[in-house]
Structure formats: C-alpha cells, structure tokens
Amino acid sequence: MSAAPRLHLGFADADDLRVVSALVQDAVVKAADLVYLGGARRFALVANRFCWEAGGEAFRRRCGLHFDTVRSARVKGIDRNAVEQVLELLAIEVGENENGVLIDLIFAGGAQIRLDAETLEGGLKDLTEAWPTRQAPQHESDGESA
C-alpha cells in the first residue's frame, strides 16, 4: 500500500484551514460522530476521509477533526436523531464577525454546521492506517483548463 503517512495538523488561521478543508473534502461522517462539547468549548467529528495526498490512488482513512474556543454550534439539514445518517463534507469556510469567527462545515444536500468561536484553533489527526477504496470521488469540471 502506498498511501501517504498519517497526518497530524493544527490550524490557527484561514490559510491553515484551507489546507485542512482540501484534505477533508469528500469525507463521510455519520451524524452520531458529530459532537459539541459545550463545557470544553470544542466541536469534534470523526470521519472517513479520502486521501487526496496519496497521489491519485484511491485510499481512505479514519480521522478526527476538532475546533476549539467554540461558543455555539448550529445545525441545519441534519437530523440529530438519525444517528446512522451519512453526510458528505464538501468544504469548511471561515469568516470573521465582531466577536470572533464563524466556521461553516458545508455538507452535500444543503446540510450545514455553523460554529461561533472566539478564535480559529483546532486540528486534524489521522486515526488509522489507510485502506483501499473502490473509487475516488468524482468532481465535474468547471469548464476551465489549467
């Protein structure tokens, strides 16, 4: 197996988060694996991410992703009682507000989680070795060539 080594990355600004967002693009997560720990001011999830860094080979691996200093988490389009609901993470975006930052986890089908945090802090950690998957996620071309 030639998947890349496990990742363990922190993020503290929008540029860092863009890298993490690219790494977790097309990750799949069950609703049961999303948690907001209000007392610890942390939002965390566990997902199966596609290993984009594996050089075009089709591998996935289990990873954990967390955001710190989170004051609140609002959910749209996710049934928290449907614990087996599988969501596909498309992107993570960040914007500033008067009290800190807003972090949007955007999922396929219009589902979204909005985190209100004091600062942009967190990390991504691969939890398992990579395993082969039958196919890589497919993205339609936007019509432009590089």
Image: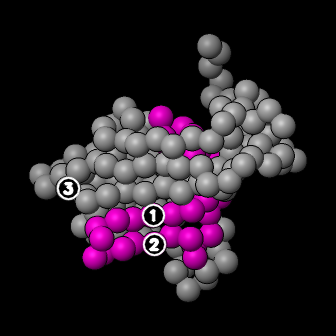
Quarter of the image where the N terminus is located: top right
Please give the name of the residue rendered at 61% of the width and 54% of the height, measured from the top-left corner.
Answer: 127
**Amino acid carrying mark 2 in the image:** Val
Q: Residue furthest right?
A: 134
The answer for how far apart the CA atoms under marks 1 and 2 are is 5 Å
**Amino acid carrying mark 3 in the image:** Glu
Q: Is residue 62 magenta?
A: no
The answer to whether mark 3 and mark 1 are in CB contact below 8 A is no
Alpha-carbon neighbours of circle 2 within 10 Å: few (<14), some, or many (≥20)? some
Closest to the observer, 31 or 35? 35
Label 2: which secondary element: strand
Q: Is residue 16 left or right of residue 111?
A: left
Q: Residue furthest left?
A: 98
Please state the horizontal and vertical placement of residue 88, each as a whole percent of the image.
62, 57
Q: Is residue 2 left or right of residue 13?
A: right
The answer for how far apart the CA atoms under marks 2 and 3 are is 18 Å
Please give the name of the residue rendered at 65% of the width and 50% of the height, measured from the top-left corner.
Answer: 49
Question: What residue sits right under mark 3 in the picture?
Answer: 118
Alpha-carbon neighbours of circle 1 within 10 Å: few (<14), some, or many (≥20)? some
Q: How is the image coloured?
A: one colour
Question: What residue sits right under mark 1 in the picture?
Answer: 44
Question: What residue sits right under mark 2 in the picture?
Answer: 35
**Amino acid carrying mark 1 in the image:** Ala
Q: Which stretch did the figure color magenta?
A: 19-47
